[in-house]
Image (cartoon, grey):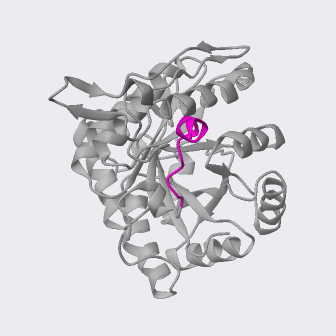
């Protein structure tokens, strides 16, 4: 468990409640504009949150909203207009080629100055068979350029040192990729890889392939059990608990009358003081951080920034300001060595 409590928010359409778009506070007329997403992420950054995730799927619905924008393109648009917060779009692995994913996320890391991450997701159960290979290829491609491969030697006309570019020569059941990438190694070396997991098979994938896993315990005792299971697989992976938050109980009641709310993660309905109590209790069970799912956007995000964050700061449990400039830095993760440079050495 890390010494510092970490906080992220998961952004999805008008919020995680299927009737969120029908709430008077929702800005449904802005949902398909860049400004909507810029304002949400800047709001999260004002609270010095570690990162935001942006949901994506190949389905038509995002919560109760029909239609959504591409998460990776949203992150790329937001990146130049923010300065510290991490940007973690969802990119599906069973319908996108790893070579393209590697270059797109590396580009996001450059555009954001080292704040890119990836929520690796499959759209079908069958996709789980290839996700580990997919992530493995992407990680190798990020390392296929050594950090000092770009030399820009105008006198000789050599822009790169070809000896510092490497074929990855990956041959697996699902992919065969020679490499190298067309994009230099990202500023973070390896952008943050994250995955959502509910059960042992995905815990095993996350432990072997990801830097951070989102888990969905039902309560404090379940949080202890989940942490113990994940820690039996990896001592180093960061464990974030997903939690749906509704910080206006009357609003939640009104929305429930419009549409039933069902979730894979626990639901908190109440004030920010009670939410702070819950987070700190689960932290004591070994949870490193939390990915909060605002029930209604922007209202519940505003309550997180204006209410929860000050409450946690008053208890000495959350940062007063950013102390790092990269996403890995926010989370206390070192910049990884390049596997091919180490092998050559």
Q: Position of residue 332 (x, y in %)?
A: 52, 64
Residue 95's place in the image compared with 20, above or below, is: above
Quadrant location of the C terminus in the rendered image: top right
Between 304 and 154, the residue placed more toward the observer is 154
Q: Position of residue 94 (x, y in %)?
A: 61, 19
* Residue 85 visible to the viewer: yes
Q: Position of residue 106 (x, y in %)?
A: 40, 35
Q: Which residues are magenta?
A: 333-345
Task: Tell me the residue at 74%/57% (across/down).
Answer: 217
Q: Position of residue 245 (x, y in %)?
A: 55, 60
Residue 80 within the segment the image draws in magenta: no
Residue furthest out toward the front: 156
Residue 342 within the segment the image draws in magenta: yes
Q: Which of the 4 quarters of the picture holds residue 178?
A: top right
Between 98 and 82, the residue placed more toward the observer is 98
Task: Tell me the residue at 62%/42% (across/down).
Answer: 195
Residue 288's place in the image compared with 200, above or below, is: below
Between 164 and 73, the residue placed more toward the observer is 164
Task: Tell me the residue at 67%/27% (across/down).
Answer: 131
Between 37 and 244, the residue placed more toward the observer is 37
**Tag count in the figure?**
0
Quadrant location of the N terminus in the rendered image: bottom right
* Residue 71 visible to the viewer: no
Q: Which of the 4 quarters of the picture holds residue 74?
A: top left
């Amino acid at each position: 468990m890390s010494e510092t409590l970490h906080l992220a928010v998961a952004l999805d359409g008008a919020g995680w409640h299927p009737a969120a778009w029908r709430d008077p506070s929702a800005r449904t007329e802005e949902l398909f504009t860049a400004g909507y997403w810029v304002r949400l992420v800047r709001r999260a950054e004002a609270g010095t949150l570690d990162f935001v995730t942006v949901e994506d799927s190949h389905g038509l619905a995002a919560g109760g909203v029909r239609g959504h924008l591409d998460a990776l393109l949203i992150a790329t648009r937001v990146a130049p207009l923010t300065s510290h917060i991490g940007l973690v779009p969802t990119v599906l692995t069973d319908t996108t080629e790893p070579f393209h994913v590697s270059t797109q996320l590396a580009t996001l890391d450059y555009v954001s100055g080292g704040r890119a991450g990836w929520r690796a997701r499959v759209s079908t159960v069958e996709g789980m068979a290839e996700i580990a290979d997919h992530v493995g290829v992407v990680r190798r491609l990020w390392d296929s350029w050594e950090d000092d491969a770009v030399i820009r030697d105008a006198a000789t006309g050599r822009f790169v040192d070809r000896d510092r570019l490497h074929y990855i020569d990956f041959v697996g059941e699902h992919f065969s990729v020679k490499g190298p990438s067309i994009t230099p190694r990202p500023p973070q070396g390896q952008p943050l890889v994250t995955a959502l997991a509910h059960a042992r098979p995905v815990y095993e994938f996350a432990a072997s392939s990801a830097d951070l896993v989102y888990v969905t315990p039902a309560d404090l005792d379940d949080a202890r059990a989940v942490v113990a299971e994940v820690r039996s697989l990896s001592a180093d992976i960061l464990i974030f608990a997903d939690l749906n938050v509704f910080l206006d109980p009357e609003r939640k009641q009104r929305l429930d009358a419009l549409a039933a709310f069902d979730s894979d993660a626990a639901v908190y309905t109440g004030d920010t003081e009670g939410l702070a109590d819950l987070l700190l209790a689960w932290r004591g069970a070994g949870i490193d951080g939390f990915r909060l799912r605002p029930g209604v956007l922007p209202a519940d995000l505003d309550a997180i920034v204006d209410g929860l964050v000050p409450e946690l700061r008053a208890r000495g449990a959350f940062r007063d300001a950013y102390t790092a400039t990269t996403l890995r830095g926010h989370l206390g993760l070192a910049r990884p060595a390049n596997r091919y440079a180490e092998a050559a050495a």
